[in-house]
Amino acid sequence: MVLFERDNEIYRDRDALREDYQPEELVGRDEELQTYQAALQPVINGEQPNNIFLYGKTGVGKTAATRYLLAHLREDAAQYDDIDLTVIFLNCDGLTSSYQIATRLVNDLRSEANQISTTGYPLASVYEMLWEDLDTCGGTVLVVLDEIDHVNDDSILYQLPRARANDDLQDAKIGLIGISNDFSFRDDLSPKVKSSLCEQEIHFPAYNAENLRAILEQRGEVAFHDDVLSDEVIPLCAAYGAKDAGDARQSIDLLMKAGDLARDEETDTVTEEHVRRGRRALERGRIKEGINGLTEHGHLVLYALLTLDLEGEAPVRSRDVRPRYTRFAELANRDPLVPRRMRDHLSELAMLGIVSVTERNEGRRGGTYREYALDMDVELILSAMVETVELVGVHDSISPYVDSDDDDAAPTLQDFSNV
């Protein structure tokens, strides 16, 4: 009895929609690629590499552009006898300290038989090993630190770009490429680190619907058989993606989800209805996963912003979120976080795509600041925050979304006149 048979009616190559797929050409990022390529040019010239800092929201092509250009850079550098290029790509998700990154870099440069323990050494000793191994490697070494905003201390971000100037390195020429999803990360760097790390800054703005449509058409041609996608599918996926913070990854995931629904139903084409149902399914999963991963204070910050948004107060500055958040923390018998830590939670919500953030510049008098607003369906958010609502209580603004006939519903919060 055969339980599994190949099904190739919808997809030609479904893997073309996966995150690790590298297209032959990047579309929708011409200006950024041109700037990025110019910043990498010193490598081909045999010169000291620039230190490059990329920033922008999740899914706007920072990592894809880096992998694309570095693949071409390695290929082109191989034509020159006097260029010996090494690229070390490190994702910092799960790495929170300079010590952890330094030990990982040492082990990436060493053979399997010569690895060091990730604990037990003074940081200065790990740096000495790193400089020795980098000089042994020699040539030009580009160190890419993706999701660099996970690092809590900036020692490594100072040491690496300045290693040659500080006479820690004699033979190797180091270039550091930092990639961040967090707009506020660079603002929190110390001046000495910022001057070194941000030698060349490249901002990746959100994709618009036209950009996303080009990306989806490129992937769709590879992933699906001819005439499988109905005419409205790619424009609708692109429109949803533009609305969802211009995230290409979400648009591609939506196209794949729509294709999977069509395949599961054994239909001949992917339709607009598949896209709409796929979006609802992905949103529920993404919001639930993102909110479930927040700390308790992250939930309280989100609840505060949600209620302000429903009252028509958003977009709102963090300083105006704080009184509501503080009140909720007190009702939950928790000590409120200091303002900076509360802002970190707002940044995390923005990174997850649950909250949108807009930078404002009021000039010399008002300075630069950020405003936050809800970027997701209220009911979906509340469905993932049942425990928080039960802990704090039902704020008047969300009462229309709470079943008043439910005996187990949390009591309505009274006395919000001061928040």
Image (cartoon, grey):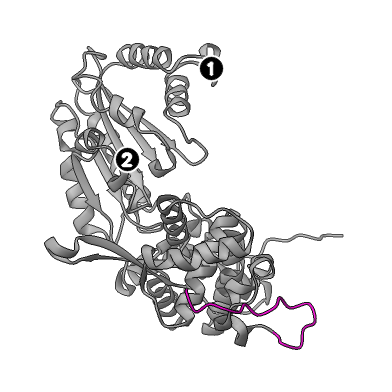
Residue 68 image position (x, y, % from top left): 32, 46
The answer to whether residue 206 of the structure is visible from this angle is no
User: Does the CB distance between marks 2 and 1 fall below 8 Å?
Assistant: no
Q: Residues within 10 Å of mark 2 (few under 14, many from 20)?
A: many
Q: Residue furthest right?
A: 1
x and y, in percent, of residue 234 in the image: 43, 76
Q: Which mark is residue 178?
A: 2
The image quadrant of residue 4 is bottom right
Q: Is residue 321 left or right of residue 166?
A: right
Spatial separation of the CA atoms under disc 2 and disc 1: 26 Å
Above or below: residue 212 compared with residue 57: below
Instruction: Write the residue at 80% across / 82% down.
Output: 407
Q: Taking the image as drawn, is residue 21 in sight?
A: yes
Residue 398 located left or right of residue 229 = right
Residue type at the position of mark 2: Gly
Residue at image x 49%, y 41%?
A: 93
Q: Is residue 414 magenta?
A: yes
Magenta-drawn segment = 403-418
Q: Position of residue 29 (x, y in %)?
A: 26, 59
Front residue of 125/28: it is 125
Q: Residue 154 falls in which quadrant of the image? A: top left
Judge depth for marks 2 and 1 and give the one in front.
Answer: 2
Residue picked out by circle 1: 112
**Residue 158, placed above or below residue 125:** below
Q: Earlier in the sequence, mark 2 or mark 1?
A: 1
